[in-house]
Image (cartoon, rainbow, N blue to C red):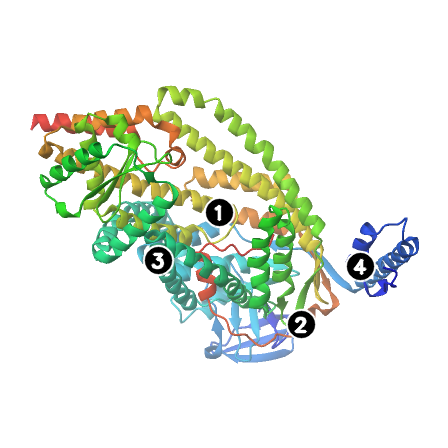
Amino acid sequence: MDAKIDFSTYSFQELLEAKSTIDKQEYPERAQEIEELIAKHQQKQTKDQQAEEKLIVREGHAKFHGDAKEYFSIWIVNLLLTIVTLGIYSAWAKVRNNRYMYSNTEIDGHRFSYLADPIQILKGRVIAIGLFAIYYFTASSSPFAVAIMFVALFFATPFLVCQSLKFRMKVTAYRNVRFSFKGQYGRALLVFCIYPALSVFTLYLAFPWVLKKMDEFVIDNTQFGDKSFCSLLSGGSYFAAGLLSVLIAIPFTFVPLFLLGAFEPETAKTAEAGTSYLVTLGTMFSYLLVYTIASSFYQASIRNHIFGSTKLVDVAKFESSLDFVNLAWINLSNLLALILTLGFAMPWTQIRKMNYLCDNTKVSILEGADSVMSSPDGDSNAIGDEVSDAFDLDIALG
Amino acid sequence: MYTATLYLTGSSKSLPVLLNIDSREFLIVKDESSNQVITQVAFNTLKTHSKLGNLPREVHLPDNQALHIDACEAVDNWLFRSTSGKLYKLESNFRFILTSILLVPLCLVGIFKFVLPAMAIHFADLVPEYATELASNNTMLALNKSVLDPSELPENKQQYYINRWQQMVTQLPVDHHTFQFQFKKSEYFGANAFALPNGTIVVTDDLVELLDGQDSLLAAIILHEIGHVVEKHSMRFIAESIISSLAIDYLIGDLGGTIEVFAGVSNTIVQNQFSQDLEWEADNFSLKNIHLVGYSPKDFATAMQKLSEQSKDSNQLDALLHSHPLTKQRIDNAMNFNSSKKQN
């Protein structure tokens, strides 16, 4: 108990933790020592920050040049070609749509490039469809095979996540330098499978922390040429965002349910199928409403947090200033537009969202931006990405 | 002279440049400020990304340098002289865009409504018998472990109905050896009956109690289930679900978030549509054949009526996902079937 603890080896996070847990009455000297060390760390941080600010060469917002009318024309023509070729053309359509979005995104006067090869995507899709068909067919024929499939998918998920990110990064370039992803299976298994499974035992209370680990894994393993992204995410922000999203969802869940409840006795009496259809529609719509509002809140706060605490070492710092109300409005009205136009508003909704995201993304260019070296191309193909898509593994930050 | 950005080999270095395309064979790249020639590249060594919208034209030079050239007509004419650029032409052709707006929904409806179900019929025929048998046995096993309990109906009543139905099947234009009847008690299903693809038809105790003594009504429902088996609905539905969910995913599911939700909802609606079509087919099978066993479509209507009075929302599955057509329409269908028969 009395052994001397060497706090100087503690990280800043650990010191903060130690401060909050230490019994000040019993160990005044230790508490004092921790306080001093924390102060030192804070001084160092402000110094680092000042030094960094000197390194900032330029600052500016991301710009999006996409035009809804132009994109609609491209999208609808490619959609028709996809349909009349019974899906074969979909790989080319994907490349064209993505190219349009990437190449219209500009940071610091330079645009992104999307470099995927349609043939690779097509190959990936053929394999993905085969696997999905086997999965679906087996799952519907034998409930016991489902269990086996489930285990297989559990262990395949981290692999697919890594492959998918590898591909997506590799086909993204900026200033003629490609991005890359260095994540490994073992760590991905821990972060995407084991942690979420374990969080069940905390009744999902620890889930925000799991989400933080996932985002950290994705960011810290991403590289731009020879430069690494580096994040300093805080668990607190994830817990706050998660908790508040749930709190927001509660009134939005119960108010519509309560209103629907008023219809219930009537339905029971008349057994009029039309009314119950209304209830179904109402339930579905209120679910969409709740989901969109709560997820907008989460998305806004987590994106702001991630951008604010992520650096591309020597190259850039980021800032995101999404506003929950604006984002929720955009997401909700986009959803409504999609429903009312039976999907035809898709290009318009994407352009609108991208405009909003870019308008609220600030990038500070650091001194090293001109001297990023491209790193050798790693091996990567589209199979993992397409299979992840087919199995609906959602791979996105925040 | 046209403006562009030149990206140098191997790093993020770039510089603004001016392009001279006076020669048809050579692209001359000059520094913007000093006007000094940086490089001169032969046209046939350039790798140019296809023309897309008004994007800066992306050109890769042989030594891994890249040019982003601001789009303009002269540059386009020079760069894309040997490629047809058909896609770009279609994407900027007003009439073709209008045509697409009309054809996309038409084709989608055609595919989902006719092509896919037709393909599914072929698929169902291809499924070997042992696969159907395996699937049915496993499903039954799982249901027995989860939502089905042994029947509590008296033995003699069970035997009475089984005999009646076995005899009824022999009067139908189907292979009557396939069919097997079982009774199960189930709170989950309520008053209901369902068929497995191998011809096992399960009737719940609640259904028998609801319609007890009214052989004609039970027969109408059993005929509906036989319709599912004869027309291989399980396998057809599986095929339809696989293809439609993939198609929807690939058509609209590319960019997460709200769109994912939209894709999910569309998928549910489309699948329910398939399921409803199959229910109609089974209904009509029952109505078409019911006179062969000595009853009339009216009995089917009455059975539906009784079921709807009893079950409604007690079956959560039905209330949330409308996999079945509205009962009122099904009753109307049966009544109309009746009258049209009489007229003939």
Q: Position of residue B15 (x, y in %)?
A: 65, 71
- Which label lies toward us, 3 or 1? 3
Q: Are marks 1 and 2 on the same chain?
A: no
Residue B328 makes an appearance in the image: no
Q: Are marks 3 and 4 on the same chain?
A: yes
Q: Are marks 2 and 4 on the same chain?
A: yes
* Comes first in the chain, label 2 or label 3: 3
Q: Amino acid at mark 3?
A: Ala
The residue indicated by pointer 1 is: B259
- Which label lies toward us, 2 or 4? 4
The residue indicated by pointer 4 is: A12
The Cα–Cα distance between marks 3 and 1, rounded to whole angstroms, is 23 Å
The Cα–Cα distance between marks 3 and 4, rounded to whole angstroms, is 50 Å
Residue at horizontal 25 percent and vertical 28 percent from the top: B304
Residue B56 makes an appearance in the image: yes
Label 2 CA crowd tier, 10 Å (few <14, some 14–19, many 20+): some
| Label 4: element kind | helix
**What's the chain of the residue with tag 4?**
A
